[in-house]
Amino acid sequence: MTDASAGAGRAQEFEKVLSGSDTSVASFDVHNKSPIEKIQHFLHSNPAAVPLIVLVLSLIFFGIAVGERFFSAFTLTLILQQVAIVGIVGAAQTLVILTAGIDLSVGAIMVLSSVIMGQFTFRYGLPPTLAVVCGLAVGALCGFLNGVLVARMKLPPFIVTLGTWQIILAANFLYSANETIRSQDIAAEAPILQFFGQSMKIGSAVFTYGVIAMVLLVLLLWYVLNHTAWGRHVYAVGDDPDAAELAGVNVQRMLISVYTIAGLICALAGWAIIGRLGSVSPTSGQFANIESITAVVIGGISLFGGRGSILGMLFGALIVGVFSLGLRLIGTDPQWTYLLIGALIIIAVAIDQWIRKVAG
């Protein structure tokens, strides 16, 4: 079979997947599977299963080690508050990684957007609502530039976003003059900037609007990725861009849209981090890019693209939150958190490679 005919066959398969009409079962896949093969196929079909299992086991472990107070509504919602920013940025990172890319600039975009919101309000006297819109627009613009460089200039995503990360970070410090806008000033003159830090109580559980925004965002993206043509195209581009192109997907436009939306989500995280901290600080979110990648990888989303669930990313972020708070309550050295998270990352990648053998 020639490369052209093989590509055409692959494109026909993609057309069926993209149209949702591929309901057939391969005729050769009728042999009785071993228990191990069944597990592989189950995990391949349900990529969020592994992080969900790990999350439940970690909750049980720390529930036993810490005691009943770990399962209190206050403690569990505190974990949600701690991972809200990582969860929002992780949603942006998920979209990019599903296309077989990576975005190292997510944290820098988040911080620059928050600085724009604060500086436009207090330096230029813009209405706070308009300043927020400007911050969101700047985040989307940064993502758009990443997308153009990756999609149209065919530059590697890692190199592109490594460069834009440095540029955006430098622009952030130069523009803000490393100035922090105090929480008292924001509360007095522009409380809308702290909107996501406000909370509501349900019994002893405390939910900030940032947590609610994270959950709603993840659910919205889960629906879009699983029930819309755009979402199917994201997976198709990550799985095989050449075949997706042959199937009629405009790969360049898809990549630009993904990076632009990711930038917009990072700007939303910038607004949320103002609420979380109460202030606008150009030094906040220093490790957001690494934390978002950690949540994605532990969440079972393949770094090779085309496979994974955004719900898995949320579970991955929660796993990190559970380990961080659980180890702190036990009284262990904080370095154990990094050690165990590092081990989880390596194990998650190994499991992903093992699961990928099903499709091999």
Image (spheres, rainbow, N blue to C red):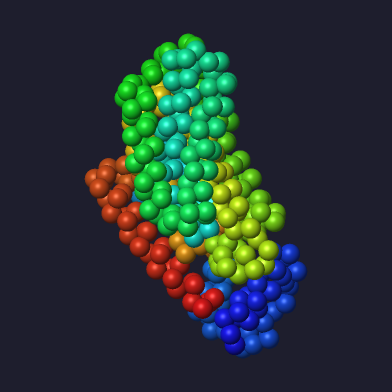
- Residue 11, position as x, y percentages in the image: 65, 72
Quadrant in which the N terminus is drawn: bottom right
Tell me: residue 74, above or below residue 57.
above
Q: Return the residue nearer the eye: 46 or 288.
A: 288
Q: Return the residue nearer the eye: 157 or 277.
A: 157
Tell me: residue 193, above or below residue 230.
above
For the point 32% across and 23% down, the residue is 177
- Residue 193, position as x, y percentages in the image: 51, 22
Q: Return the residue nearer the eye: 172 or 55.
A: 172
Q: Residue furthest right?
A: 21
Q: Residue furthest front?
A: 153
For the point 38% across and 64% down, the residue is 347
Tell me: residue 142, above or below residue 46.
above
Is 103 situated left or right of 358 in this image?
left
Asked if residue 70 shows in the view, the reply is: no
For the point 57% across and 36% down, the residue is 213
Tell me: residue 271, above or below residue 7.
above
Asked if residue 5 shows in the view, the reply is: yes
